[in-house]
Image (spheres, helix red, strand yellow):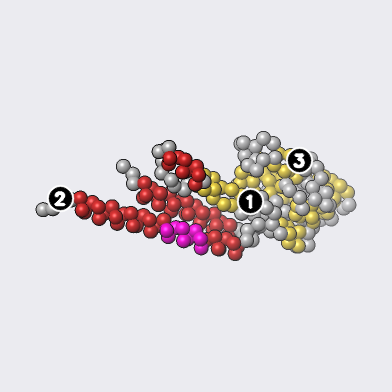
Amino acid sequence: MTDRILEIGSAGLESTDQRVRKLMDNMVNADIPGYKKSEAVIRGFPLELESATQRLGPVRPQVESSHYSNLPGALVKTGGKLDVALGTDGYFVISGPWGDGYTRDGRFQLDKDGRIITLAGNYPVLGQSGPLVVTPGADVEITQDGEVRVDRVVVDKLRVINPEQADALTPLNGSIFKRSEAASGLQEVENPRVIQGYVESSNVNVIDQMMEMIMVERTYNVNAKIISTRDANLSRAMEMGRPTQ
């Protein structure tokens, strides 16, 4: 028979471990443009209390999923003609081996064939007519409405999509996403606000993450103390229950 207090303590250690991993990921990627802060979603106490009341299981924290914050990061000026940021909701569309991908990391560059690709991963950036290709050495301009102009001639327009549901996108990493199986639709943004010469920084506040790390460490220590104390008490109880010689 499983001891409920030990089970609760063990679940607490596991949930805090998941939270620490998310915090570490956030701090490591805090300097990646377009990176979205991720958090471990812990099953709420009321649900666990109801479960325990119905004797379905002990009251214990459980990690259910990961949540990525969609809050925008600050805009950082770079001056690069192929660096762009979105001043509206939505994501740039890129082409990956898995299919279409979506990102707010607007650090773009040209490859040897004149394709506009992402700096991270070298994925082709998509326009409304497909992958964006320009003449090598030509003057490239990206206007505020997303038009791509080569030597002042419009050749295409950046595709920008906005998910209709919060869970419409699933992360491949913190800055590139793909469409989730549960997504009902992705809306094309006809008139995006594109800002050339800027990139969007991550939405991670390192100081906040460090403060949360301290709180999680304290929670971890409490759970470890629960397990240690319970184990010691059980050991003493077993000793007391043994017959004397």
Place of residue 59 in the rendered image (x, y in percent of width and height, measured from the top left): 43, 45
Q: Can you give x and y, in whole percent of width and height, for residue 19 in the image?
A: 51, 54
Residue 215 covered by magenta stretch: yes
Pointer 2: residues within 10 angstroms few (<14), some, or many (20+)?
few
Nearer-the-camera pick, 48 or 159: 48
Q: Nearer the viewer, mark 3 or mark 1?
A: 1
Q: CA distance from mark 2 to mark 1?
A: 59 Å
Q: Which residue is mark 2?
A: 243
Q: Residue furthest front?
A: 53
Q: Amino acid at mark 2?
A: Pro
Q: Is residue 167 left or right of residue 194?
A: left
Q: Which residue is mark 3?
A: 188
Residues tagged 2 and 3 counted as in contact (Cβ below 8 A): no
Are the residues tagged 3 and 1 within 8 Å (C-beta)?
Answer: no
Q: Which residue is mark 1?
A: 69
Whole-Å distance between the Cαs marked 2 and 3? 76 Å
Q: Which residues are magenta?
A: 214-222
Q: CA distance from mark 3 to mark 1?
A: 21 Å
Q: Secondary structure at mark 1?
A: loop
